[in-house]
Image: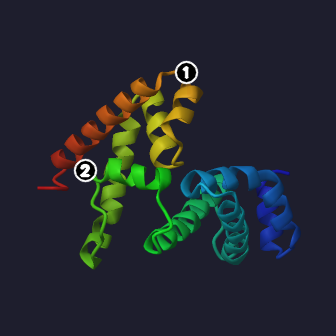
Amino acid sequence: MEDRDIIALYLARNEAAIAETEKKYGKYCYSVAYNILYSAEDAKECVNDVLMNAWNSIPPHIPSVLSAFLGKLTRYVSLKRWRYARTKKRGGGETALVYEELSECIPGNKSLEEELQEKELAEIIGRFLDGLPAVERRIFICRYWYFDDIAAISRRFGYSVSKVKSMLYRIRKKLLFRLNEEGVFI
């Protein structure tokens, strides 16, 4: 079923929208959630929460790209669950490592003032990613958007683990330089 047909089901408040969404995007959402949580049970629960959130969000929101909308919802729900588990001293894994790697580039705690600057930061990072070669951009997104582990990225792109680590390190340094250039940390 095409995305526009699934969205039409949501707009008509037809419960088949949930089943069709799970059929088409369930594995994708599960993969994103699992890469963040490293728990099959938690990932399944997140997918269910994502489906419920999609049901509650469409309408009034009508996504232009359903897969991106669901991916963003999945990240949000999964990271919320990860933070909860981490506060209870039950977390860890790849997600903590990803945040640690990016901590030198991007501040972690947001004040109200920083929230106002969040869009500007997102635009700077977006422009930065647009300027990267396609492979570097895809590797960066796999690691820092989808939370893929480095071994999986190396298999996907046919590079050694050390080459992927090196590429990610160089990309983070370029990002830090760009952010400093844009006055984000001055």
Q: Would you name the residue on which mark 1 appears? A: 158
* Residue appearing at x 57%, y 58% in the figure: 37
**Amino acid type indicated by mark 2:** Glu
* Residue appearing at x 73%, y 68% in the figure: 48
Vertical position of residue 2 compared to residue 150: above or below: below
Residue 161 position within the rendered picture, expressed as x and y whole percent measured from the top left: 46, 27
Residue that lies at the very extreme toward the left in this rendered image: 186
Q: Earlier in the sequence, mark 1 or mark 2?
A: 2
Vertical position of residue 9 compared to residue 28: above or below: below
Instruction: Report the number of discs.
Output: 2
Q: Is residue 116 visible?
A: yes
Residue 30 position within the rendered picture, expressed as x and y whole percent measured from the top left: 69, 55
Vertical position of residue 47 compared to residue 68: above or below: below
Secondary element at tag 1: loop
Residue 35 position within the rendered picture, expressed as x and y whole percent measured from the top left: 58, 50
| Disc number placed over residue 104 in the picture, else none | 2
**Label 1 to label 2: alpha-carbon separation:** 28 Å
Residue that lies at the very extreme toward the front in this rendered image: 89
